[in-house]
Image: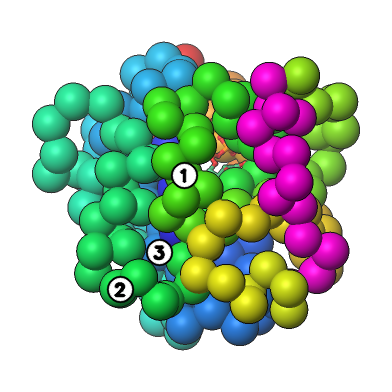
């Protein structure tokens, strides 16, 4: 699972998902847009539009799935609930991974039911350029004793571990910068898939901050 706001999806998300799948030999990576992300402001475009952009961005990429399951749920989008649903579907023996960028990881201790996340899945933290801050004390406490050295030892169990991973193509692309560029009429070419850019242009999205 790679959850996020995807406001809009960009090549940092998509390339990370492809490389994560390869690095961990995953069957699938579900990219799951949050309907109402609890720890940030209202996204700029509707959940359905963010999902449509994500579907376009993924296109026919093998192993990547645009998963709209959080959009049908009432209330805030808690990852613990989404992981519980995936665990239910996959069974107790399947290895389930929640991936997140280092920026999101830094706030993990503030999430809803953070310990529950580890009961349901492994956490894999993807290194991201420009996010090198030290870990807060509450986070260090949360992850104590969970860290794996390599993929093999992590994936020997179905859940409960933590792995920090540096993927081959680290990309300094963020949705914040894309929205800033779109609002300012600047080019976003090669930062997101062409089909996503075409729909953003056709629907006049992200024109105002
Ligand atoms: P924003 O700038 O609006 O905060 P974002 O670009 O960080 O957005 P999100 O939708 O918040 O995108 O990210 C979803 C997940 O993908 C998060 O775990 C985030 O850390 C990760 N992610 C986003 N961009 C990258 C990137 N360039 N490389 C690696 N991981 C990324």
Placement of 184 over or under 19, stated as above or below: above
Q: Alpha-carbon neighbours of circle 1 within 10 Å: few (<14), some, or many (≥20)?
A: many
Of mark 2 and mark 1, the one earlier in the sequence is 2
Q: Nearer the viewer, residue 31 or 144?
A: 144
Q: Nearer the viewer, mark 3 or mark 2?
A: 2
Residue 78 position by quadrant = top left
Q: Residue 30 carries which label?
A: 3
Residue 27 is left or right of residue 137, and the answer is: left
Residue 166 is left or right of residue 15, and the answer is: right
- For label 1, the residue is 117
Callouts 3 and 2 close, C-beta under 8 Å = no
Placement of 30 over or under 28, stated as above or below: above
- For label 2, the residue is 90
Q: Alpha-carbon neighbours of circle 2 within 10 Å: few (<14), some, or many (≥20)?
A: few
Placement of 139 over or under 144, stated as above or below: above
Q: Nearer the viewer, mark 3 or mark 1?
A: 1
The Cα–Cα distance between marks 2 and 1, rounded to whole angstroms, is 16 Å
Magenta stretch containing residue 192, yes or no? no
| Residue 177 in view of the camera | no
Q: Which residue is drawn at 73% across and 57% down?
A: 163
């Amino acid at each position: 699972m790679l959850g996020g706001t995807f406001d809009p999806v960009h090549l940092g998300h998509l390339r990370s998902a492809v490389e994560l799948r390869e690095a961990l030999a995953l069957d699938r990576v579900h990219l799951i847009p949050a309907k109402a992300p609890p720890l940030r402001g209202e996204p700029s475009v509707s959940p359905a539009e963010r999902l449509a952009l994500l579907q376009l961005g993924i296109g026919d990429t093998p192993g990547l799935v645009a998963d709209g399951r959080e959009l049908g749920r009432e209330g805030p989008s808690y990852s613990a609930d989404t992981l519980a649903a995936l665990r239910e579907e996959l069974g107790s023996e399947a290895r389930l991974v929640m991936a997140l960028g280092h920026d999101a990881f830094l706030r993990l201790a503030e999430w809803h039911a953070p310990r529950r996340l580890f009961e349901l899945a492994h956490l894999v933290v993807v290194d991201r350029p420009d996010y090198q801050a030290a870990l807060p004390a509450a986070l260090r406490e949360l992850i104590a004793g969970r860290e794996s050295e390599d993929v093999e030892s992590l994936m020997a169990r179905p859940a409960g571990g933590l792995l920090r991973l540096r993927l081959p193509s680290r990309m300094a692309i963020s949705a914040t910068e894309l929205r800033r560029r779109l609002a300012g009429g600047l080019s976003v070419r090669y930062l997101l898939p062409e089909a996503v850019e075409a729909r953003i242009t056709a629907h006049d999205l992200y024109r105002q901050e």
